[in-house]
């Protein structure tokens, strides 16, 4: 039987990019979408550290996904790092953070990593995750992040073209980096525009995440 991968979404704009990535990289997987867009709305109201109440709420959301028979759970929003850690401790299947695989690809390119983000509350958790990942990898790398104001609002309003343009306009500020990461699943749709604006590798989260989840599931199946 095809493995069931439950996708946890905190915003609808993350859904299309990950579905496209599964269609390209792992079409045999059975994907199930769970959306609670109230999570991102309420997370934006607490821009600092994620609250204990939000962590508990996210874990309940993820456990519901596991109860659906998930073989793996993939989170598509970047602002819930500590909650994802908690969820992974409570369910017996692989739980993948949205950017773990992209970090792996980025530091393979060099030490100076840039990131273009469109959702402010995610920057702190992503920076912490990057630093932990770099420490565990034993490789030296630094992260410089630019928040692209208004891009997310334009995307949510249905104006993807302006969203992509706003992100691409800021990309040259990171042209001295060894790689540029597009922070969120939703920003991956700007990849072509960003690549046209800079000459350094531009990395997106969805395809890397699908490849990583597939490797985790296939390893578990062989065990």
Image (cartoon, grey):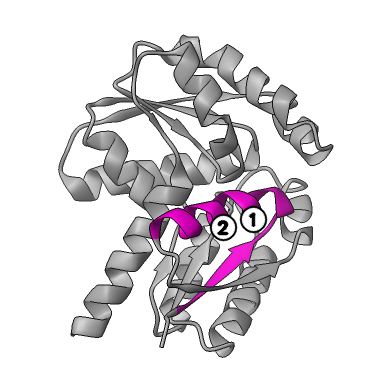
Circle nearer the viewer, 1 or 2: 2
Q: Which of 215 and 11 is in front in this view?
A: 215
> Which quarter of the figure is the N terminus placed in?
bottom left
Q: Which mark is residue 214?
A: none
Tell me if residue 7 is in the magenta stretch: yes
Q: Position of residue 12 (x, y in %)?
A: 72, 54
Q: Which residue is drawn at 40% across and 63% down?
A: 26
Q: Where residue 25 sits in the image (x, y, percent)?
A: 39, 56
Q: Which residue is drawn at 72% across and 35% down?
A: 152
Is 51 on the left or on the right of 155, as rendered? left
The correct choice, above or below, for 71 with respect to 142 in the image is below
- The residue tagged 1 is 15
Q: Mark 2 points at which residue?
A: 19
Q: How many labels does the image show?
A: 2
Q: Disc 1 on helix, strand or loop?
A: helix
- Is residue 99 in view from this perspective? no
Label 1 packing within 10 angstroms: few (<14), some (14-19), many (20+): some
Q: What is the x, y in percent for residue 59? A: 59, 74
Q: Is residue 69 above or below residue 192?
A: below
Q: Give the range drawn in magenta.
A: 4-25
78 vs 71, nearest the viewer = 71
176 or 58, which lies in front? Answer: 176
User: Left or right: where does residue 109 sit relative to residue 55?
Assistant: left
Judging depth in this view, the residue of 117 and 161 nearest the camera is: 161
Q: How crowded is mark 2: few (under 14 residues within 10 Å), some or many (20 or more)?
A: many
Q: Do the residues labelled 1 and 2 touch (CB within 8 Å)?
A: yes
Circle 2 SS class: helix
User: Quadrant of residue 190 in the image?
Assistant: top right
Considering the image in quadrants, where does the C terminus appear? bottom left
Is 55 colored magenta in this rendering? no
- Farthest residue to the left: give it: 138
């Amino acid at each position: 039987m095809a493995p069931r991968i439950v996708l946890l979404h905190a915003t609808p704009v993350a859904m299309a990019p990950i579905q496209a990535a599964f269609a390209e990289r792992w079409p045999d997987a059975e994907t199930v979408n769970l959306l609670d867009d109230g999570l991102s709305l309420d997370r934006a109201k607490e821009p600092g550290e994620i609250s204990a109440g939000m962590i508990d709420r996210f874990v309940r959301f993820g456990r519901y996904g596991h109860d659906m028979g998930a073989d793996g759970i993939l989170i598509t929003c970047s602002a819930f790092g500590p909650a994802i850690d908690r969820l992974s401790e409570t369910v017996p299947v692989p739980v993948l953070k949205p950017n773990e695989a992209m970090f792996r690809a980025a530091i393979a390119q060099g030490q100076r990593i840039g990131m273009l983000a469109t959702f402010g509350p995610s920057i702190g958790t992503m920076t912490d995750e990057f630093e932990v990942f770099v420490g565990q990898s034993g490789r030296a790398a630094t992260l410089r992040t630019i928040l692209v104001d208004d891009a997310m609002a334009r995307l949510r309003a249905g104006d993807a073209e302006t969203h992509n343009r706003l992100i691409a306009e800021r990309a040259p500020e990171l042209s001295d980096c060894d790689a540029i990461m597009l922070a969120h699943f939703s920003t991956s749709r700007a990849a072509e525009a960003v690549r046209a604006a800079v000459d350094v590798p531009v990395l997106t989260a969805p395809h890397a995440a699908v490849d990583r989840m597939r490797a985790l599931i296939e390893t578990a199946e062989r065990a």
